[in-house]
Image: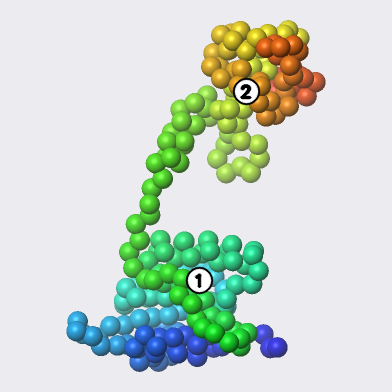
Amino acid sequence: MSKPVETDLYAPVKAWLEGQGYLVKGEVGAADVVAQRHDESGAALAIVELKLGFSLVLLQQAVARQAVTDTVYVAVPRWKGKAGWKAFKGNIGLCRRLGLGVLSVRLDGADGDRVQEHAIPGPFQPRKSKKRHAAMIREFEARKGDPTQGGTNGQVMTSYRQDAMRCAAYLADGQVAKGSVVAGATGVSRATQIMADNHYGWFCRAARGLYALSDVGLETVMAELDGAGD
């Protein structure tokens, strides 16, 4: 099977547009595909940009065509496998935010619809998540200072980790304490829950209701103190 080229997308996309009542022509002006149909409001134009995969160039070209008409699509070959669908799905969301329609084209010659519409062109208003908004506000306000540089892919110093570190630092001298005592001494109201959950493996139960620092916790605290002193 020969390697696909962009022109392989043209015939199925043209047939799909014709099924929508358009008259279709290729390479009109700077556009790969231009379609026209007439309705009660007059002549309507649709433009499709063809590419063998999503790219910044494809999106730039499609956005530029929005100066001609609001009905602009991008068309790419159908994805392959779960990874391909995941990447494709992410690009659908991006195109919706740009007001672009999305078409996928089957190039394997299998029976069935060769073109599938995944997004229609038009203005997009993203739905805000009140839950995510509130969670981000809580984390922002709970985090002490600005412990992590933006843009890093390393360990993020969240407010939870900061609180866990304060509890661990309090226990670093080898003492055993109740959660309420650690909470009162450190100001970490969720100290008992943090030590009970032991998310980082820093704590251990010395007895019923009493917590101490594990070997891993002690090493972490000492490394943190050494780093702070550099």
Q: Which residue is labeled 2 in the image?
A: 194
Residue 204 to residue 153: above or below: above
Residue 21 to residue 183: above or below: below
Q: What element does badge 1 sit on? A: helix
> Could you tell me which quadrant the N terminus lies in?
bottom right
| Residue in front for this viewpoint, 41 or 222 | 41
Image location of residue 133, percent across then percent down: 42, 40
The answer to whether residue 191 is left or right of residue 212 is left
Residue in view at x 41 percent, y 45 percent:
129
Say which of marks 2 and 1 sits in front.
Answer: 2
Q: Residues within 10 Å of mark 2 (few under 14, many from 20)?
A: many
CA gap between label 2 and label 1 equals 48 Å
Image location of residue 67, percent across then percent down: 32, 73
Q: Residue furthest front?
A: 208
Q: Do we see residue 172 in this rendering?
A: no
Residue 57 to residue 5: above or below: above
Locate residue 230: give its quadrant: top right
Disc on res. 57 = 1
Disc on res. 198 = none
Q: Residues within 10 Å of mark 1 (few under 14, many from 20)?
A: few
Q: Earlier in the sequence, mark 2 or mark 1?
A: 1
Image location of residue 91, percent across then percent down: 51, 64
The answer to whether residue 140 is left or right of residue 213 is left
Locate residue 227: give its quadrant: top right
